[in-house]
Structure formats: C-alpha cells, structure tokens
Amino acid sequence: MNRTLALAALLGANLVAQESELRRDGAHTTLLLQRGPLAETVAGPLADQALAAAELAWTTTQKLLPISAGGPRLTVRLHAVEAEFRAAEKTGSALTFPVEAFPVFDTATAHVLLWPKLSAQALERTGLPGSTRDAIVHTVALLLAHRAAGAVPATTDCLEIVAAGVLVNVTNPKWQDGIDAAYDALRWQMVPPHIDPALNLRGWLLDPPAARDRSHHELLNGRRLVLAQLMSAQSGWAKKLLQKPKPKAGELAPYEAVLGEDWGKIQTRFARLRQELAPRWQLSQPVFELRGDRWLLIGDPDRHAAVYGATPPPPVPYVFRAKVEHHFWDDVSLRLQLDWDGTSMLGLRLGDEVVVLSRWEPSKGWSELDKRRIELPSGRPYDLAVEVHAKELRVILDGTLLVTWPHDRAMRGVWSLANGDSVAWLTDPRVEPLGAAKK
C-alpha cells in the first residue's frame, strides 16, 4: 500500500511538473518554459515569442559563423519562477554573482530568467519583455559561438564579442544611438568621463579582467559591444575572431586576425569610435523599449522601471514633451522626474484623477508640493508638456495649463522616467529647448 501511494505521489509530481512546463520546438532549438503560476493563456504566447527569439538568434549567428549540425540540440530553458532559475544558476553558471541568463556549454542549454518579474496583467498586455528576448538571443549566440569555435580554445571575451554582435544585428543592425535603451546603457559606460578617455585598447586586451561583480560585468559587456562594432566593419570578422591562431601566435592573435597588427592605427580607430558614441538613454531598470514608433515603460510590482537621459537637459528654459497612453489597474505610478542634483529631485505623477508635483529626498522620500484634480482614465491618450523656466515650472496637458509652481532650483540635474506595475506608451519622449518646434 505504501509503495502504491509513493508511486502515485511520484506520478502526480511528474504530472504537475509537466503541466507547469510548456514546450515549443523550432527548426533549430527547443524552448521549455517553466511557467510556474502563469496561466497558459499568458504563458503560451510568451513561449511562442521566446522560441521565435531563439530561432532568430540561430539564423543571425549563422550569417556570421559556420555552425556545425552536429552536437546536442540547443535548448532554451525559460524560467518564470526566480527560485528555480537561481537553483540552476548555483550549479550551472560560471559567474560568482547573480545574472539573468547563462549558458551551459556541455549540454547546449541556455537558462534564462523571465525578467523583470512583471505581473500577469502586464505580460498579457505586452508579451515577452525585450530584456528577456535580448537575454535569449545573447545566450543562444554564446552557445553557437562556442560550438563554431570547436577545438579552438576561444576566450570568454571572444565569445562574448561575437554574441554582442549577434544581439545588435537582431535589435539594432544599424548600430544607432537612441533607439535601444539597453544598447545605449552599455555604450554609455564607454563614454568619458565614465571611463578613461585615453584607455589603451592593446593593454586592456592583453590583461582582460575577470568580472568581479554585476556592475563590473556590465562594464565589460559595454567594452565588448564597442569592440564588436569596431570589428564589424571587417568582412568575416566573427569567423576570423574564432579561427585557430597560427603556431606561436601571441595573445592578441584573435584580435589581430580581424583588426590587423598596427596597434597605433587600431587605437586611433577605437578612440574615434568612442568619440562618436552618443547614447541617449541610461537604463536603470527595464522595461523601457521601443516598439514600433512608441516607447513601452513598465515595471514590476516590487520595483519601478527607470530610465534616465544620458545627457543633462539644455539651459533653461526647456521643455519635456511626449504623447502618453497609460493603462493602469492597481498601481498608478507613472512619473516624470526632473533635476536630480544628488540631494533631491522633483517628480510629476500622473494618475487616475490627479496630477501631483512632489519633491524627493533620500532621507524623507516623497513630499507633496502641489496637486490638481483631473479626469485621466486608463488608456486615454494625452499630450504632456512640462515647461521649465528660470523661476517657474508649468505642467500643460492637452494644451491646458494645469500647474504653475515657483522654484529656486538650477534645474540642470538629470531627468528620468519611472513606472511601476502599469503599462505606459510614450511617443517621442524628449527634453529640448523651449523654443524648439513641436513634432
């Protein structure tokens, strides 16, 4: 009887595991979504979109590298439950700090966390977050680059540079600033003063540092992204980077196979490329991504999405403009934040029936400065303008002046956008001189 009960319990557990896992098979990859509590009506489209990302990563990588048909079938395990992902990460990741995706080369498996942890309402409305799509593409590209390298002992840097190139070919093939916040955020770290303007590329490549923590890992990814752009101008760059070096070749052989051996010229090209970088966004927490001609800004129930302007606003007077369409259910927390000067900032919160102007200070949190009642139902589009004058702030909605607030601030600090568990669509959010023509 005990054996019968134990067998029934085991079969029941297996059945629950199977029911909580969705499988999708593509031409080259298999997608397994461990959906946890997500309803199948939400999880099903996510699985389809995740498989599409994995297949796109394969075909894009194949244009850069010869991919052998041999070896195990590539599998993407997408985890909707963070605890399950962290358990797999603990035994499978080569890194010593938490990330949102990692490859297991021996089993040709990409483990990816569904991140950020959006609510079911948000996922149903917006589908797979761009951050998760990017993680799938990047990790699949790492697996394929490792396979293409074969017996060649490719360095982590070389594999990561190829994966960075694949990801940009998928998300931003013209290598443009301002249209991909995640791309901008990585390149932002390569722009002085965030990094030494006289950085010696050859010395950096001769002594590649291992990632110490998450922020250092992001810095290294920024470097790899810029290196991928530098190399992408050369025909067959990815294949050359992973090819077997000549006997007695030095440590720089993979890079010299792509860039040549004149490090004076290479350094000049590298410095010129860095001078041309003009990132528009500094992404603090996703989701902030361009879909069609609108930006999607959405956070999770526990942590707001936040994106900052990568450059300071122009001298006063200037104006923030955007067309906004805000869909909310419980959390009404879309906020424009102005003039973060290291000690405080102003915030304009737009909600169901109210527009609130507040000040935020680290020791006090938010304190209300002004409030206006207004009918602003979920989903109603509106034109927002916030004019910043030398001694006055004006909030204008659909051409109507709502708030006039006197101030004595410099108003040259960082500006940003933040949102919680609600869906905000923004068309052309920007800060510009007040006299600039409206778009």
Image (cartoon, grey):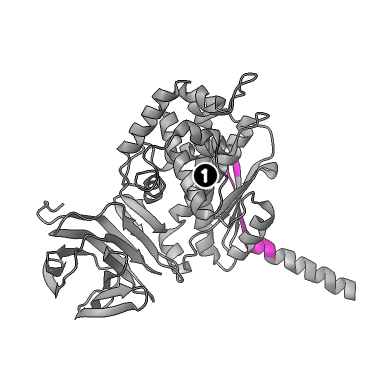
Horizontal side, residue 439 vs residue 141: left or right: left
Q: Which residues are magenta?
A: 17-29
Q: Secondary structure under badge 1?
A: helix
Tell me where residue 116 appears, x and y as whole percent: 48, 61
Identify which amino acid the numbered label 1 is placed on. Answer: His
Residue placed most toward the observer, 298 or 436: 436
- Where residue 400 sits, quadrant-wise, is bottom left
Residue 242 in view (yes/no): yes
Tell me where residue 246 appears, x and y as whole percent: 62, 19
Identify the residue shown where x is 50% and y is 64%. 117
* Residue tagged 1: 138
Quarter of the figure that contains the N terminus: bottom right
The residue furthest left is 435
Specify few, some or many for label 1: CA neighbours under 10 Å numbering under 14, 14-19, or 20 or more: many
- Where residue 146 sits, quadrant-wise, is top right
Q: Is residue 370 above or below residue 431?
A: below
Residue placed most toward the observer, 419 or 270: 270
